Amino acid sequence: MLGVFGGLIALALIAGVAAFAYLYATTEVPPPEKFALSEKTTVYYADGTTPIGDYAEQNREIISCDALPDYLGQAIVASENRTFYTDSGVDLKGILRALWTNITTGSRQGGSTITQQYAERYYLGETTSYVGKAREAILALKIAQTESKDEVLCNYMNTIYLGRNSYGIQAAAKAYFNKDAKDLTLSEAAMIAGIIPAPSTWDPADDPKMAQQRFERVLNIMEEDGYITAQEHSEASFPETQPVAQQNDYAGANGYLLDMVQRELVQSKAFTKEDLATGGYKIVTTIDKAKQDVMQAVGDVRLEDMPSTLQVGGIAVEPKTGAVVSVYAGSDYLTKQLNNADQAVFEPGSTMKPFALLGAAQEGVNFNTLFNGNSHQHFSGISNEVNNALENNFGNIDLYQATANSVNTVFMNVNEHLTPQRTAAIAHEAGIEGDIDETSPYNVLGINALTVWDLAQGHSTIAANGVKHMLHMVNKVQDSNGQDVYTASTEGKQVFDANDCALVQKAMQGTTTYGTAAGVSTTLGRPVAGKSGTANDENAASFVGYTPSLMNVWAIWNPDENGNPQVVPAFSGYGVSSTGYPAHLFTEYMSKALEGTEVEQFPTATDDGKIGGSDGTWGLGGGSVYSNTTQSEGEQSTEEEQTNGNGESTANGSEGTSDGATNTNGSQSQQDITQQCEANPSFSTACPNYTPPSSDNGTTDTPNSGGNGTSSDEPGLPNDSSTGLDNAPSLEQQSAQ
């Protein structure tokens, strides 16, 4: 047995020696110009064949090192391998450690010596295989044996990636300081040498603090190792670099896509910027070329009297997978790097109300529960009265109509029962990552700034029947051999009850049929769930809408030259706060994106909640005392509703009901509907003289618009300006309270 075992060991050793000998004999030391990988990392649309652009232009120039100042090479040695001039050039333990890490984790770990780093550059992209890593180790051995230290250092300086698409010290000198490498100062050499481990991340343009720290580290080591004097050290100051020159692939809208894909992969921790710039990968995105072209064209439209400062952001996603199919981030990345889809923020206004509506469903509130929809109400924790936009009064309406008509006072009532903390928690559970004030009752009216991406993330969870899929733009990444090295996860997590979400979807369909975006569903010829919103003080407007398979979000805002929000003025007939424009953008995009697709139906919702909620305190139904504030003369009054000794509902005032709603006894009050219809023919489709909104630019001259050709906030219905509070405190005042 021992003999057999010993024989096997001997055979293994012989096989290993033979394999080493073969690899050593067949591994040649290539010339320096072949060390920088010739393949670019290319990003493609979802079809996998149409390129969006590349991450590196492979800018490199091989130069002689004879004219370079000594301190340049010394700075690199100080930064990367202090024992370079005395060690053997190869750290066998480091090679084995890197091999094991690469194979077991799939990550790429480089060599610890300059010689090994130099060898690694040639086999970049192959070092996760046994053979690739073995050849890298053997190449390092042969380089150490056949080249002098000066040759190795020169070749290393000529081939290493140094950020800004620059391979080699000559290209880097021009990229950072617009000069030849031979003219670099000690300070400039130390700065470049310091950021070698992560040049794209530690570029002074991106992380000046880290670049400064690395710069000082290099100078400290150079002084310690005798390369420079203390005086030279003290006289060296951190150099000023040139602005980053963007490559041509980043021109126009493609630059936003390339930047977003890069940020997504880096944030996943699967890649570094250097990996993407030098790895020769093929990145396949989820962006649909046809839909992206449509979205870009829709967002790029600039109407004649549209303010030049007005910003537009948009996104379209598949709620069932989280795949982003198109984005509108801006018109030209080289002109404006701030991304309007996932970086710039705006106040979402009433597009936050569906999260509170979902909370009501979770609390067992039947959506037919009646609420007081009039203005001039007071709520706990707020000293000012709360009004609807234009101080409109809707009488007693249910949650379906409150959602469709975006009635502020109803949702403030909902938030009072639910609590601002719970409303914020629901939004976060849905996937929204932006800050939401958990202490302000106004958070249900969207007073906290978010991105278009964040808003879409939250609503997509409701649209996917409670399953949260993280939004993503990358489908997969392949290496130079066509092997998948990264695949996006499309596995979702059920965070909300599907039927609760179906109820919210049902209520949001009222928005696009008879509510604030009436006519959208008819125009698209299919059921559409939607919600519009206007920010506090009318400085932004947005619209969220979706079918079961495709969600589209648009927002507009109007920053001043310092980025501060200012009012979105009326333009091209789009209302005093232009809230009809996001709905118009939605209709323009979806009409083309859905062309030729099957008409889908939303899931059937079962409303098994109780009128007034499980405790009977919600709205006007269920039994507890409900007091309404004093209203202006001539307005419908709902004074006080309470229970009698038998638990039956009685009221001193009228019990107004809305279209399709029931009162606590299950019957409709036709008299109240008639009164409300007389006051506002657009109150409900049940009104005999119901007047639908006109389709002229998504706006209409309602009785509240003054007949001046501008809309009162959202198409055809009363203003929905976030808080809608003419007398409400400003955001600054709210913060102070």
Image (tube, rainbow, N blue to C red):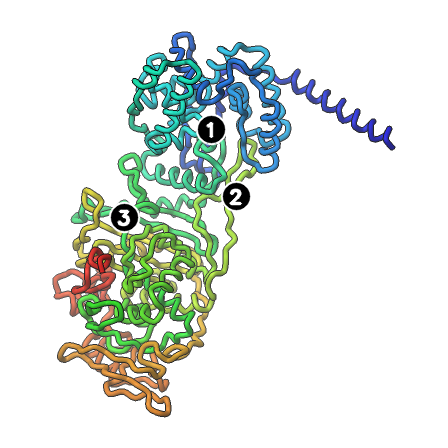
Task: Determine the CA span between mark 2 and mark 1.
Answer: 19 Å
Q: Are the residues at dot 3 and dot 2 in contact (C-beta closer than 8 Å)?
A: no
> Is label 3 or label 1 in front?
1
Q: Residue at x 24, y 54 (%)?
A: 540
Of the residues under marks 3 and 2, which one precedes in the sequence?
Answer: 3
Q: State which quarter of the image contains the N terminus.
A: top right
Give the numbered dot on residue 487: 2
Which residue is most to the top?
66
Return the residue nearer the eye: 696 or 415. Answer: 415
Q: Is residue 176 left or right of residue 198?
A: left
Quarter occupied by residue 729: bottom left
Say which residue label 3 marks. 312
Q: Residue at x 21, y 50 (%)?
A: 565
Quadrant of residue 641 in the image?
A: bottom left
Q: In the rendering, which numbered label is found on residue 278? A: 1
Residue 91, image quadrant: top right
> Which callout, 2 or 1, points at the residue further toward the start of the chain?
1
Q: Is residue 485 shown above or below 76?
A: below
Amino acid at the residue labelled 3: Val
Element carrying mark 1? helix
Residue 49 position, x and y percent, is: 47, 37
Q: Amino acid at mark 1?
A: Thr
Picture coordinates of residue 175, whole percent (x, y): 34, 23
Q: How many other residues sit within 10 Å of disc 2, few (<14), some (14-19) or many (≥20)?
A: few
Q: Amino acid at mark 2?
A: Thr
Question: Within 10 Å of the Cα at label 3, are there few (<14), some (14-19), or many (20+) other Cα atoms?
Answer: many
225 or 42, nearer to the observer: 225
Q: Residue at x 23, y 85 (%)?
A: 653
**Residue 539 picture location, percent across and down:** 21, 54
Label 3 SS: strand
Q: CA distance from mark 3 to mark 2?
A: 31 Å
Q: Is residue 595 visible?
A: no
